[in-house]
Image: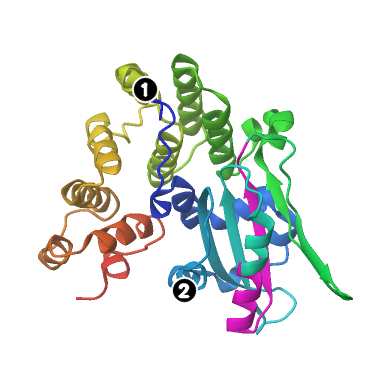
């Protein structure tokens, strides 16, 4: 593995999961606008991570970046709810379409509701465009089709991404750059450009921090170029009078993410909580100190969408 090819094998560590959890509505609006229009967003939506894990536990996952199961409500009926299964595929895989069908029928069988399967193809092989699974034998035939968004198609619409007010456009640009650019210096330059664009869009402090983490995690640099990038970020923050990201905290966070140490993840969570909710009360301090690795991972992911400390850690 090269210094720039540092994508994590652990599925729960994917920045795509963080992005989908933080900006699911914006994700659909950008990549699947027709489906976005069919959802009644006023009724909210919920992530069913444990339910999806039960469905996919014994399936061959392939080289995916993330998968999510989301419960939404349809516009055409106040009591109609639909499961949306999102699969973000990192590399071409021969059995991908069959796996999409496997998850589809398992979810449909278990919950007895409509299931909409969506594929995000984050690879760079233009010919890899799975959109259906089909088999037939002795007069028995089945065809399953699903919408797929090929991210490199946006390279022809790059100006639209740069001008878009949709926050997810930055995620798509970062992913395309991460796949296309292997030269460290070039990656650093485009990463700085993305961060500058982030600071120029008028987002809230919380949004800037969340998107910075996603972009920073997705578009990684050789260690030798990290000081230059940190200096560039500091310069942008000084110019915009927006000192939102502490580069020292960022280095500590990246070290924790790379090494996966319990202490590092715990420290990162504490700093995220301080940034979003303020000082940590005693009950929360005790809960975090006694948490397992899996629980800390869950809280780190959920903090993006939690509206209170009690909602994140549970009532005390």
Give how far across and how far down residue 297 sits, in percent: 30, 57
Residue 133, picture quadrant:
bottom right
Q: Is residue 299 left or right of residue 143?
A: left
Q: What element carries label 2?
A: helix
Residue 108, image quadrant: bottom right
Q: Is mark 1 on a helix, strand or loop?
A: loop
- Locate residue 200 relative to residue 115 in the image: left or right: left
| Label 2 crowd (10 A; few <14 / some 14-19 / many >=20) | few
Q: Residue at horizontal 41%, vertical 26%?
A: 2
Magenta segment: 103-123
For the residues labelled 1 and 2, the Cα–Cα distance comes to: 37 Å
| Disc 1 versus disc 2: nearer the observer | 2
What's the residue at 37%, 60% (across, down)?
Answer: 302
- Location of mark 1 (residue): 222
Q: Quadrant of the N terminus?
A: top left
On the question of residue 40 being in view, the answer is no
Instruction: Please say whether residue 79 is visible from this viewpoint.
Output: yes
Q: Which of 1 and 83 is in front in this view?
A: 1
Dot placed on the residue nearer the N-terminal end, 1 or 2: 2
Residue placed most toward the observer, 171 or 205: 171
Q: Position of residue 286 (x, y in %)?
A: 11, 65
Residue lying at the far right in this picture: please name it: 139
Residue 54: mark in rendering:
2
Q: In this view, does 177 lie to the left or right of 32?
A: left
The answer to which of 286 and 78 lies nearer the viewer is 286
Question: For the residue carrying disc 1, how many other residues have a C-alpha within 10 Å: few (<14), some (14-19), or many (20+)?
Answer: some
Q: Give x and y (percent) for residue 7.
A: 43, 38
Residue 62 drawn above or below residue 181: below
Residue 132 appears left or right of 226: right
């Amino acid at each position: 593995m090269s210094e720039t090819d540092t994508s994590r094998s652990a599925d729960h560590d994917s920045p795509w999961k963080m992005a989908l959890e933080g900006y699911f509505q914006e994700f659909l609006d950008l990549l699947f606008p027709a489906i976005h229009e069919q959802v009644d967003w006023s009724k909210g939506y919920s992530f069913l991570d444990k339910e999806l894990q039960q469905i996919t536990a014994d399936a061959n996952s392939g080289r995916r970046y993330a998968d999510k199961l989301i419960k939404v409500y349809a516009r055409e009926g106040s009591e109609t709810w639909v499961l949306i299964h999102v699969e973000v595929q990192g590399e071409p895989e021969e059995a991908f379409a069959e796996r999409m069908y496997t998850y589809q029928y398992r979810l449909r069988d278990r919950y007895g509701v409509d299931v909409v399967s969506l594929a995000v193809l984050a690879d760079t092989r233009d010919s890899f465009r799975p959109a259906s699974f089909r088999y037939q034998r002795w007069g028995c035939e089945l065809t399953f089709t699903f919408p797929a968004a090929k991210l490199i198609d946006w390279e022809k619409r790059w100006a639209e991404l740069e001008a878009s007010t949709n926050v997810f456009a930055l995620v798509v640009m970062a992913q395309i750059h991460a796949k296309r650019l292997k030269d460290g210096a070039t990656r650093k330059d485009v990463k700085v450009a993305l961060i500058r664009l982030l600071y120029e869009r008028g987002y809230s402090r919380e949004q800037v921090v969340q998107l910075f983490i996603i972009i920073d995690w997705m578009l990684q640099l050789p260690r030798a170029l990290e000081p230059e990038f940190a200096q560039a970020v500091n310069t942008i923050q000084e110019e915009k009078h927006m000192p939102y990201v502490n580069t020292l905290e960022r280095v500590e966070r990246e070290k924790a993410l790379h090494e996966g140490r319990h202490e590092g993840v715990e420290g990162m969570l504490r700093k995220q909580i301080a940034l979003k909710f303020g000082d940590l009360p005693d009950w929360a301090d005790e809960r975090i100190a006694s948490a397992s690795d899996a629980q800390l991972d869950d809280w780190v992911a959920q903090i993006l969408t939690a509206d209170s400390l009690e909602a994140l850690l549970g009532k005390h």
